[in-house]
Image: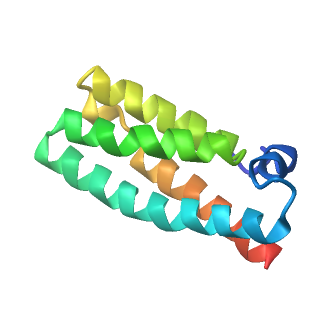
């Protein structure tokens, strides 16, 4: 994963209307909300609750896509699909966490 772009800066700029401060705010929201959703996803998986797990993966997919965190969005999309299929063991929680932390590292470099 390290070779892929963490955030598509053109997409982030578009989402923020060209306002650099808003770019930072959007990334902070993604990281904060993403961490909470990831923990809720892990809890739902542990409980065997595929619908609840899907409810956590879906907004993570959308939010990351909207700010150009495309790798995170792709991983979250796969997680959502696995939840829909009821294959909770296939959800790559560690990969989601690692990519979310890559976005956080990117965010820190922008501050």
Identity of the residue drawn at 63% across and 40% down:
65
Q: Residue at the location (73% across, 69% down)?
A: 24
| Residue that appears at 20% across and 48% down | 44
Q: Which residue is the extreme one toward the bottom?
A: 111
Residue most extreme to the top: 85
Q: Is residue 17 above or below residue 32?
A: above
Q: How is the image coloured?
A: rainbow
Residue extending farthest left: 47
**Residue drawn 84% across and 52% down?**
13
Instruction: Provide residue 23's location: percent of width, then percent of height.
Output: 75, 63
On screen, residue 99 above or below 62:
below
Residue 37 at x, y = what percent? 37, 56
Q: Report x, y in % for residue 21.
A: 78, 72
- Where residue 7 appears, as percent x and y from the top left, is 76, 51
Position of the C terminus by quadrant: bottom right
Q: Name the foreground residue: 9 vs 81.
A: 9
Q: Is residue 95 left or right of residue 44?
A: right
Quick one: 89 or 53, which is closer to the camera? 53
Decide if residue 38 is on the left or right side of residue 78: left
Q: Quadrant of the N terminus?
A: top right
* Number of numbered tags placed on the structure image: 0
Q: Nearer the viewer, residue 69 or 95?
A: 69
Left or right of 7, for residue 48: left
């Amino acid at each position: 994963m390290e070779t892929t772009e963490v955030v598509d800066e053109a997409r982030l700029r578009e989402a923020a209307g060209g306002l650099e401060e808003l770019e930072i705010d959007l990334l902070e929201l993604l990281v904060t909300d993403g961490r909470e959703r990831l923990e809720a996803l892990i809890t739902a998986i542990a409980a065997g609750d595929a619908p609840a797990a899907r409810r956590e993966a879906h907004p993570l997919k959308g939010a990351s896509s909207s700010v150009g965190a495309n790798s995170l969005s792709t991983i979250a999309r796969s997680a959502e699909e696995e939840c829909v299929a009821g294959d909770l063991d296939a959800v790559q929680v560690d990969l989601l966490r690692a990519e979310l932390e890559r976005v956080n590292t990117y965010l820190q470099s922008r501050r």
